[in-house]
Amino acid sequence: MKLIMAVIRDSDNDAVSQALIEAGFRVTRIASTGGFLRRGLSTLIIGVSADRVDQAIEIIRQSTAPAVEPGMRRATLFVLPVDQYTQI
Amino acid sequence: MTHQENSAPQPEPHQPADSQGVRLIMTAVIQLQDLDKASHALEEAGLAFTHLSSTGGFLGRRNATLLIGLRPGQEEQAVTILRKTCRRRVEYISMPLEGSPYQMPLSTPVNVGGATIFVLPVERYEEIQ
């Protein structure tokens, strides 16, 4: 089990969440803010089994719109190991 | 988020965590009053971060949670910055006076922490350009 934290733009949030949910991933969205004066980011928290990490990342890659300015990132992804995963 | 590698973009999008990649993520819960100072200091130091609005469990006050991606060697720097910018404060909450027949609330001092920091390992880090 892995936890993916994906920082994406607000404007991509609907498309990304929808695409992930359609593929059977569970997504939690947190409104977040980038560094100084960089508003409008969302952080998605996605719990995935280890063998589906690549698929989730590929979906995020495909459902984010191209960056408006060159050099800007579409998404920043952290994959964290999970010691224990329980659903109640 | 700022990052310094813009000038030398990686040719392959699938970039495994190399020596320059983010290896740790720091989750720091800080007081809302300290957010401006802390974010300015982190920004100046070139540390990439994002922040979330959160609420403390005990006092129920609004606070901020910072997620800071750390490259090798940046951990100490981040802790030092938070230590300098996030102050420990005394807040007062009213509690009913125990054993008193009157409903007189008593002001009780509570120490509110400067920052609560968790550092977690990052197995894989990717930037989608």
Image (cartoon, rainbow, N blue to C red):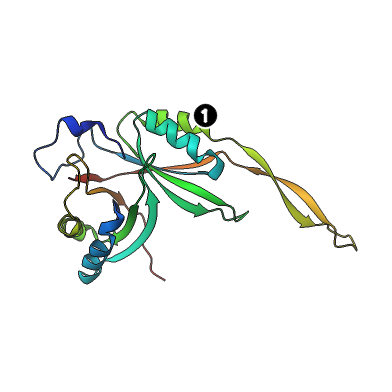
Q: Residue at x 49, y 34 (%)?
A: B37
Mark 1, residue position? B84
| Host chain of mark 1 | B
In which image quadrant can residue B15 be found?
top left
Q: Quadrant of the N terminus of chain A?
A: bottom left
Q: Relative to B24, is B94 on the left or the right?
A: right
Q: Relative to B8, is B106 on the left or the right?
A: right
Q: Position of residue A73 (x, y in %)?
A: 22, 44
Q: Position of residue B109 (x, y in %)?
A: 73, 45
- Residue B19 appearing in the image: no
Which is nearer the eye, A83 or B88? Answer: B88
Q: Relative to B57, is A86 on the left or the right?
A: left
- Residue B50 appearing in the image: yes
Residue B9, compared with residue A83, is above or below; it is: above
Residue B108, compared with residue B10, is above or below; it is: below
The amino acid type of the residue labelled 1 equals Lys
Q: Residue at x 87, y 60 (%)?
A: B99
Q: Residues within 10 Å of mark 1 (few under 14, many from 20)?
A: few
Q: Position of residue B74 (x, y in %)?
A: 35, 30
